[in-house]
Image (tube, helix red, strand yellow):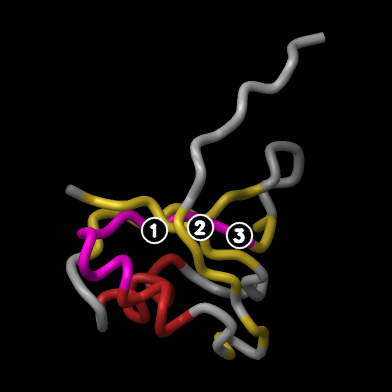
Amino acid sequence: MSKNIYVGNLAWSCTEGEIRSAFEAFGQVTSVKLVEDRETGRPRGFGFVEMDDAGAMEAIKNLDGKDFGGRNIKVNEAKPREERPRW
């Protein structure tokens, strides 16, 4: 099984490669996706990492609140996206 991890408060200059490297220290990383603004294409400062269960728990425990690119990142298990009302 794999877990989806939310990574927030990222520096806008942060790359998917840098995130992958940091998380690979704790296990096999399946995917990294940094979220961009639909209008501007600029990074929104958060993303998601998918990795194996055991590695995910270690990564969350070791990386949450740590300095990454000059900012203290937020790392926790991603929650399923809530349905937003359509207008």
| Residue that lies at the very extreme toward the right in this rendered image | 87
The image quadrant of residue 45 is bottom right
Give me the residue at 37% from left, 81% from top. 22
**SS for callout 2:** strand
Report the residue marked by disc 2.
6
Q: Marks 3/1: CA distance? A: 10 Å
Pointer 2 and pointer 3: residues touching (CB < 8 Å)? yes
Magenta highlight on residue 52: yes
| 2 or 3: tag closer to the N-terminus | 2
Query: Which image quadrant is residue 53 in?
Result: bottom left
Relative to 66, 29 lies left or right: left
Residue identifier under label 3: 46
Compare residues 39 and 5 and report the one nearer the observer: 5
Name the residue type under label 3: Phe
Q: Which residue is mark 1?
A: 49
Magenta residues? 46-57
Q: Dot 1: few (<14), some (14–19), or many (≥20) neighbours within 10 Å?
A: many
Secondary element type, mark 1: strand
Residue at the spot 70% in from the left edge and 22% down from the top edge: 84
Give residue 72's position: percent from left, percent from top.
Answer: 64, 84
How many residues crowd mark 3 within 10 Å: few (<14), some (14–19), many (20+)? many
Identity of the residue drawn at 65% across and 75% down: 11
Query: Which marked residue is nearer to the observer: mark 2 or mark 3?
Result: 2
For the residue pair 80 and 8, the one nearer the viewer reads as: 80
User: What is the x, y in percent for residue 64?
Assistant: 52, 78
The amino acid at mark 1 is Val
Picture layout, residue 49 above or below residue 81: below
Q: Is residue 15 magenta?
A: no
Instruction: Name, please, the residue furthest toward the top.
Output: 87
